[in-house]
Image: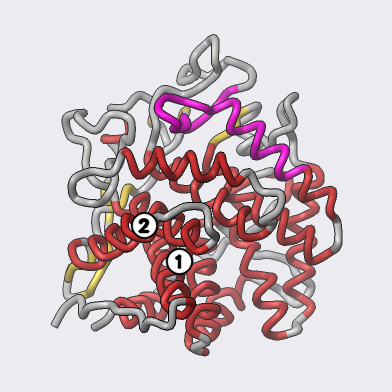
Amino acid sequence: MTVLDYFDAYAARYQPYKDGRWCYEDGCIYRGLVMLHQATAQPRWLDHLTRLTAPQIAADGTLSGYRIEEFNIDNILAGRCLFHLSQQTGDPRYMAAAHLLADQLAHHPRTQAGNYWHKQRYPQQVWLDGLYMALPFQMEYAQATDQPALITDALDQLNGALALTAGPAGLYMHGYDAARRQEWADPVTGQSRAVWARALGWLAMAMVDIAAIVPQRAPRQKTADLLHAIVAQRAPSGLWPQVLDAPQLVGNYDESSASAMFAYALLRASDLGLGAWHSPGKGALKRLIDTRLLRVDGITQLTKICHVAGLGGFDGKIRDGSPGYYLTEDIVADDAKGVGPLMMAVAQSTQSAHQTSAPPSFARIDG
């Protein structure tokens, strides 16, 4: 079995993450399938994408389980697949759904500084996760509908969020509370207390995607500086620890989803001319394929993925944002938040190989 065979089998057995409701977790897989289709031109990836999204997108563009009044920024991410589906099929329901998500952003609550709240139930809070969830979609929608002001707004939000969350050694903190009311927030800076690897992974992917969408306007130097800081935090394994700014923390571990995100970001940034990061990107991708794709219960699965992490109360748990908190969350296998970025990294590696006329090389991952 090759890694592409693994993705094919994974997509074939994939079940909607939240009982069929439109959500960002499914969106990670959809984004991976889009990129695999673009990189390989193999119809199986588009077939998986259309099959998986079909029950979620009605003929009029209505999205299953989606409620605009929740103002959940996470729900925007899955919308990125709509542009590819529209282009490939011409079916009007896909742009109708994109219009629905864009309408959410048009009314989404913002901080005084102009950044989208993470969710209605997380008022005045900006999380790095949300930058990936919303801003690339907003910019792609702007291009599809000829609304350049939306691109300017997205760039302003990105630069504003970077200033608000800037942390040590060129890294960025997971969250920011404009109201200074959350227990996890520093009363002076409003920032949370740790650099969570996957939060920085969402940010890195957002910045390289934005550099691809608007190459002449993206903050290229800030993107390069971030990737330089990320490479500096790489563990001896070639992957990255769950708590990025506390590598010696007892119980800290190399986490798969963030490592896949960083591999993707480094590979794509290199192809965009933002720096020479093919070596650490390819090294991380190879390490993930060689050591984290394992047989679990008779099925090849991507292992050692942090299931979920956040800030504030959730399901009766207090998420205080301390470095130690991030080590208390469950570690799982085959979660969409890890598999989707691994798809993206492999697709980007394949695209890189096409650009250099060298065939992509993926070793077999099991017998």
Give the residues drawn in magenta, as a range. 153-177
Q: Quick one: label 2 or label 1, which is nearer the N terminus?
A: 2
Q: Nearer the viewer, residue 201 or 70?
A: 201
Q: Which amino acid type is marked by label 2?
A: Ala
Instruction: Please tell me how crowded label 2 is: few (under 14), some (14-19), or many (20+) other residues with Cα within 10 Å.
Output: many
Q: Nearer the viewer, residue 366 or 269?
A: 269
Q: Gap between marks 2 and 1, in whole Å?
A: 8 Å
Q: Which residue is mark 2?
A: 260
Whether residue 122 appears in magenta in the rendering, the answer is no
For residue 31, side relative to residue 231 (left or right): right
Q: Which residue is mark 1?
A: 344
Q: Are marks 2 and 1 in contact (CB under 8 Å)?
A: yes
Whole-percent x, y for residue 122 in the image = 59, 32
Whole-percent x, y for residue 53 in the image = 58, 74
The residue depicted at 35 percent of the width and 53 percent of the height is 257
Whole-percent x, y for residue 140 in the image = 71, 61
Q: Is residue 345 depicted above or below 221 in this figure?
A: below
Q: Is residue 149 depicted above or below 298 in this figure?
A: above
Q: Quadrant of the N terminus?
A: bottom left
Main SS of residues in magenta: helix
